[in-house]
Image (cartoon, coloured by chain):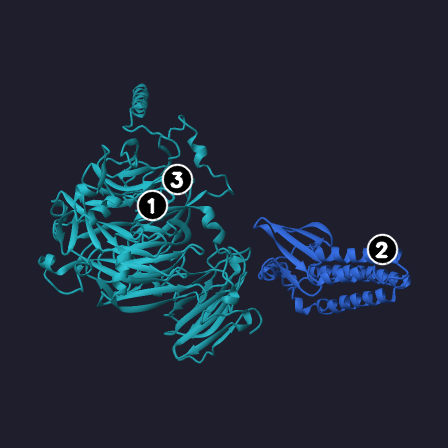
Amino acid sequence: MKNSTLTGWGIFILFIITSCAPKGSDDKASPFSDDVASKVYVAPGQFDEFYAFLSGGFSGQMSVYGLPSGRLLKVIPVFSLDAEKGYGFNEETKPLLQTSYGFIPWDDAHHPELSQTDGVPDGRWIFINGNNTPRVARIDLSTFETVEIIELPNSGGNHSSPFTTENTEYVVAGTRFSVPVPQKDVAVETYKENFKGALSFISCDPVTGHMNVAFQVLLPAFNYDLAHSGKGASHGWTFFTCYNTEEGHTLLEANASQYDKDFIAAINWKKAEEYVKQGKTHDFPTSYYHNVYDDNSHMATSEQIKSVKVLIPDECPGLVYFLPTPKSPHGVDVDPTGEYIVGAGKLSADMSVHSFSKMLKAIEDKAFEKEIAGIPVLNYDAILAGVVKSGGLGPLHTEFDATGNAFTTFFISSEIVKWKVGTWEVLDRAPCYYSVGHLMIPGGDSKKPFGKYMLALNKITKDRYLPTGPELSQSAQLYDISGDKIQLLLDFPTVGEPHYGQGIPASLVKPKSKQFFNLADNAHPHVTKSEDQAKVVRDGNVVRVYMTTIRSHFAPDNIEGIQVGDKVYFHITNLEQDWDVPHGFGVMGATNAELLIMPGQTETLLWEPLFEGVFPFYCTDFCSALHQEMQGYVRVSKKGSTVPLKWWTGSSK
Amino acid sequence: MILASVILVLVFFFPIWRITLIAPQYPTGITMYIWINQITGESPGTLQNINILNHYVGMQMIVPDSIPELQYFKYVVGALILFGLIAAIINKKGIYLAWVILMIVLGILAVYDFYLWEYDYGHNLSPEAPIKVPGMAYQPPLFGKKMLLNFEAYSYPYWGSLFIGISVVFAFLAFLFRRKKSNSL
């Protein structure tokens, strides 16, 4: 008894010692140092100041958070199926996921990018890239729904995307993996001879936002990693980092890390437009899909495109220049003035900052080191504005605040370093838990950063939260950057891997948020605008159920005369015209998912009954006090049965 | 007196009554406007939303086309305007007073009629209603505030009624201060 008590005390003392031991990092968020909690406290019923859009990485989706609270507001399905919303399962959204490889239910989504006007986020749309099967999606910020996905031809791994130009003239895309262009069956060893890297400029209609691959620029077989477009002085240019200028095709971790310097490719897209006008493009035969969702018909349609315009730099002088940049640069970020182009050599400790005006002068003076495939390589010293000697390791990405400071993430040393643009002086540093990739300052890659907050997007969380088995979440960490010192405020887990993020004041998005769809404007080919138009129509083995929902019943809610082997399309129109009254629809044995139908919207679920019997269906979204009563039955008879097709609700048989 | 008639024209452009329902799920309320010839809401879906709520307790659907008053009230008001103008031309004290009394009597009748409709909607409930609360009626107040289950109902006259009142006041003033040689006011 005594012994066990002593052991107990021993353990207790050990525990105290352990808890007092230095943790290896000074936690600046200590509640004793400042009133941190009140800075992130958004009282119940109050709104956050900013929307933050974080990519879901390998979840394929985009999540929307409020800042500073870190509250999750919505997960927007983009490239991956989402059974919760019926996305990719209902007939209306299936075409959005069509590609030249067929229907693809997943992708790896990395970089959200808000549309801009005059170089400032305007809150109209947000774009995001699909990395695996190269695509770019556009999300409408009045509905927070994916409304367009375009596939990219001649590409493999759309990583350096979809960074926008100042007025969203273009969002860009670049191939991380060079591939044979056009694709063909060749030996991998013939990489240098047969492979190419295509950079795509996707134009956006200023009114509808509709995307179109305007042209591609065909570059040497490097890996095009990240991009940012110029702004202000450098408007008209887009900068892409590249690694593997060694053109290795195996064991890249070594083979692509041999040269001291790789490049930032500077593309003069205004010049490209001239060349396109002059007809300097080549029409390359290819195949890619363009899918558009329409908010009036509530349907997406797919179009296959079979040719793309390509510019060859050798034939277009002044179109592309290479800026030598040390050690496999990853991020390329342009400061708010557009003068400085920061290249983060991810295998070095320092960052090279190029000067746009020096770049123009070097071009004028023909200060070239050499040429690669007709592309001049500018003299490194002639274009260098300065070097940031950070003392960190593995710089990746830089964002800017409104007062001339830059913040750069360091993956290996797991920290963010604050430095002064122009003097390159290091001002402060803050640890990240752990291994930060991108960072996000609202408007931090635009001409007018909104500043105030900074979000670190971390790859590893290890001991930061309660453990959840082998798989742990990624995380975001919120810092206050309004003072001289960076202050950690909040640490929250994220949905999927938040590669990059975008932030925008809520006031630029909230007033445009749609509450419901106007039923009178519903142009769905299978809409049912009132209960008395509800019906069931058979055409061979295709049965179309024109059904309506309104609190708290379906019309019809009893259906007979369906047969085994039928393809039953439930075209369901939600007649509600009020905010936040969606109805759901689940039918027993459906091999796809539910429908989640917004007020005024029509959605379609395909149901193929396998057995005879009577099967229930019901509303899946708690809609009203009598939600539980919102249900019905479908009677399924054997094939060729004489049971007549009948439907009704209530007594109106 | 002409002014009295002209002001009455405004009744065609402004609702005469407003009913607002507020509940936890409807923090900003649902508001319904009653005109002399139609029933509207703050959005095109309002009437449907009110009908959805009402059907749970078995109230009849509010279908403006099936309310005869909304069809013929505009003619009554039109006739009153015409009568007012004729009265102005005739310019007799007695005829002004007659107009004022007619307006007041018709006004009282209209409010009583409105009350009857409210009573009918509130009491004439479907026996098959999903929610039946014994002894509970859902008649909105004629004037003022009342709790109807989870809804706080507010009912007050709106601009149109104010114009009717002003019109009557002007007509009464015309009766008091009739000018012998002039036929205005």
Label 2 neighbour load within 10 Å: few <14, some 14-19, many 20+: some
Quarter of the figure with the N terminus of chain B: bottom right
In front of the other: A124 or A494: A124
Q: Secondary structure at mark 2?
A: helix
Name the kind of residue labelled 2 in the image.
Answer: Leu
Tag 3 residue: A451
Q: Which chain is cyan?
A: A
A178 lies above or below A381? below
Q: Secondary structure at mark 3?
A: loop
| Image position, residue A106 (x, y; %) | 30, 57
| Image position, residue A240 (x, y; %) | 24, 50
How far is disc 3 from disc 1 in space, using C-alphas? Answer: 11 Å
Name the kind of residue labelled 3 in the image.
Answer: Gly
Residue A134 in view, yes or no? no
Residues at marks 3 and 1, common chain? yes
Residue at the limit of the structure toward the front, as seen here: A365
Residue at 63 percent of width and 63 percent of height:
B128
A3 lies above or below A506? above
| Image position, residue A647 (x, y; %) | 50, 73
Quarter of the figure with the C terminus of chain B: bottom right
Tag 1 residue: A445
Please state the chain letter of the residue tagged with numbered disc 1 in the rendered image: A
A290 lies above or below A455? below
Please state the chain letter of the residue tagged with numbered disc 2 in the rendered image: B
Q: Is residue A396 left or right of residue A445?
A: left
What colour do you see for chain B? blue
Q: Is residue A169 left or right of residue A651?
A: left
Label 3 neighbour load within 10 Å: few <14, some 14-19, many 20+: many
- Assess whether mark 2 and mark 1 are in contact (beta carbons under 8 angstroms): no
Upstream in the sequence, badge 3 or badge 1?
Answer: 1
Tag 2 residue: B173
